[in-house]
Image (cartoon, grey):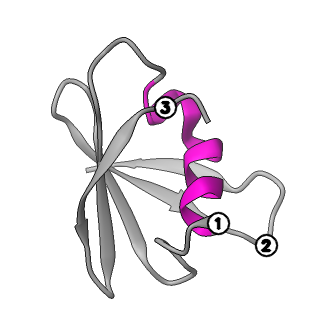
Amino acid sequence: MRAKFIVEENTTERVVIADVGTTHMSITNDAEAVVEYLLWKGVIKPGIRLFYHDSTGRRDELLFNISTEDSTGLQPQ
């Protein structure tokens, strides 16, 4: 994983993460690795919504499906 981010909110319904700085790969550009990492750490699981703030402050949702090879997608807010 090459993105750098922080967890801003972690509830039973949703997790919100945010890019840290602009010198690293963004969450958007490293989405699959970010989702894999968060799943591995137990931060997210099926049924939890994953939102992120990019380096410009825009908030979007990362859609993930752990049962398919192409596991991530972006959902603009």
Tell which circle, 3 or 1, labels the residue nearer the N-terminal end.
Answer: 3
Q: Residue at x 81, y 64 (%)?
A: 68
Q: Which residue is mark 3?
A: 3
Of callouts 2 and 1, the N-terminal one: 1
The type of residue carrying mark 1 is Trp
Q: Residue at x 26, y 21 (%)?
A: 21
Residue 17 x/y as whole percent: 31, 52
Q: Can residue 37 be found in the magenta stretch?
A: yes
Main structural element of the magenta stretch: helix, strand or loop? helix
Residue found at the very far left of the displayed protein: 57
Q: CA distance from mark 2 to mark 1?
A: 14 Å
In the picture of the structure, the residue carrying the numbered disc 2 is 67
Left or right of 5, for residue 39: right
Q: Secondary structure at mark 2?
A: loop
* Quadrant, the N terminus: top right
Q: Nearer the viewer, mark 3 or mark 2?
A: 3
Report the magenta residues as a range.
26-39
Rate crowding at label 3 as few (under 14), some (14 to 19) or many (20 or more) other CA atoms within 10 Å. Answer: some
- Residue neighbourhood size for the residue with mark 2, other residues' Cα within 10 Å, grouped as few (<14), some (14–19), many (≥20): few
Image coordinates of residue 18 in percent, x first then y, are 27, 43
- Magenta residue check for 13: no
Q: Amino acid at mark 2?
A: Ser
Question: Where 23 falls versus 19 (above or below)?
Answer: above
Which residue has dot 1 on it?
40
Q: Vertical placement of 22 versus 30: above or below?
A: above
What amino acid is at disc 3? Ala
Residue at 33% x, 68% y is 15
Q: Residue at x 56, y 67 (%)?
A: 41
Q: Residues within 10 Å of mark 1 (few under 14, many from 20)?
A: few
